[in-house]
Amino acid sequence: MKAGTLTCHALVDAYLARISAYDKTGPALTAIVVTNPNALAEADALDARYRRSGLTGPLHCVPAIVKDNYETIGLQSADGSLALKGFVSDKDAFLVKRIKASGAIVLAKSNMAEFAFSPLETVNSILGTTKNPYALDRVPAGSSGGTAAAVAASFGLIGLGSDTGNSIRGPSSHNSLVGIRSTMGLTSRAGVIPLSYLADIAGPMTRTVEDATAVFQAIVGEDPEDPMTARSHGRPVPTYADALKKDGLKGARIGVLHQAYERANATVDPDIVGVFAKAMADLSASGAVIVDDVKVELPPRAQGAGSCRGFKYDINDYLATRGQKAPAHSLDEIMASPAVASFPASVKQRAQQAAAAPLGQGPDSDACKADAAYRLAYGAAITKTMDDLTLDAMIYPTWSQPPQLIGATSQQAGDNSQTFSPSAGFPAITVPMGYTRDNTLPIGMSLLGRAWSESTLLRLAYAYEQATHHRRAPQSTPPLASGVKK
């Protein structure tokens, strides 16, 4: 753009052309729910502003893919469900507002697992099943699988997802992307339809650590509409780009968290064992010290206090505040909707279970106080282990199994990220670490750190990425004959 060889209009048009060529036709990834009809007009406005006064912000004209559970002015936000089809908010989610203020254009809303229920696959009643662009018969994981598939296939430059258990990091791993789950309270969830406010995190999914860092810088910060971000109050925001050092692994002490992936009744695929061994060797070759004898003494969860919040409580709380714009105002109204007949079987079963369960107790209840104490103790146990061993991070394969076949997913899919980071509220980043099945199916490595240690994790992830350069574009969505290069 500075050289005058590219305009925002041309860039946005090129990404829209890729969506047109590959999302519903060709490989038919089915990653996009709706495109922004005003995207080119917004690009023209940015071009005009650029001619007058230069770049509009650090994300000037960055085409963004936003998950369907983010409120986005003028675009439907249905949480992947026909029951909420037609919901168009008059407000942007905090993170959407932040990237727009930095110059980004929301190019499209992406498909997701309905209500964000599944970490394994991305299927719902509003659009159907999203495919993995690296293997069209495989899942992209969930629940942010549409964002992951779209960013991997270059339908947009960056993506926003949400992660309750593994829903940013899991799809990022399956699609050779970088995904960040931040410290609880560092990024706002305001305007993101909840699965569980106890663990929901909103954050970036990108093709490189540098891109993820740029998005992360734009979105962090306190937000009065998400009380959890009061934890960030008074805490200086680092310049995260300062962490991007190619020699960032030199002298780092990294522990192998066997507990995350070597679990009872959960086998680790031999291909992934081999890829992870190579990753540890690459870390060592880049100057890191690998500490293999790591054991976190996890606290017991208190019994008898009852249920704190939960999906039914949180979705009711969210829908009740959306007024007449929302097609439903409670989980009971959703379950009474004709749309339920179109729910995939797994979604219907989980929704029925949630609707039949007692309503969880509110934030000031004994149940929620007990839950908060457990999460605090969980984080303290991780911190103690890392302090005792002077670790900068702990690592594990993001999945123990490669992406599964569409229609054949099982709970033995090898999801390794549901406990440590979500329970503690501590940050974790996944970065591509290679491929399985004859070098075709992506797999990621997760780095888990102490609270507020995102700069450290970005430093380690960037140095590893730059030493290995594992990420490559999927063959199912090649460059178009004309247009802007990826």
Image: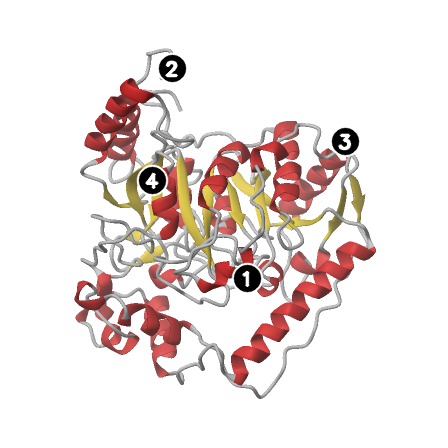
Amino acid, disc 4:
Lys
Residue extending farthest front? 234
Q: How crowded is mark 1: few (under 14 residues within 10 Å), some or many (20 or more)?
A: few
Q: Mark 1 vs mark 3: which is more N-terminal?
A: 3
The residue at the point 50 percent across, 40 percent down is 217
Horizontally, residue 273 falls left or right of residue 34, namely right
What is the CA distance from the residue labelled 1 to the residue labelled 4?
A: 39 Å
Residue 195 drawn above or below residue 163: below
* Camera-nearest residue between 83 and 275: 83
The residue at the point 53 percent across, 32 percent down is 210
* Camera-nearest residue between 288 and 457: 457
Residue 459 drawn above or below residue 335: above
In this rendering, which labeled residue sits more in front, label 4 or label 3? 4
* The N terminus sits in image quarter: top left
> Could you say where residue 301 lies in the image, as x and y percent from the top left?
63, 78
Residue 112 drawn above or below residue 317: above
Q: Mark 3 vs mark 2: which is more N-terminal?
A: 2
**Which residue is the site of mark 3?**
285
**Which residue is the site of mark 1?**
412
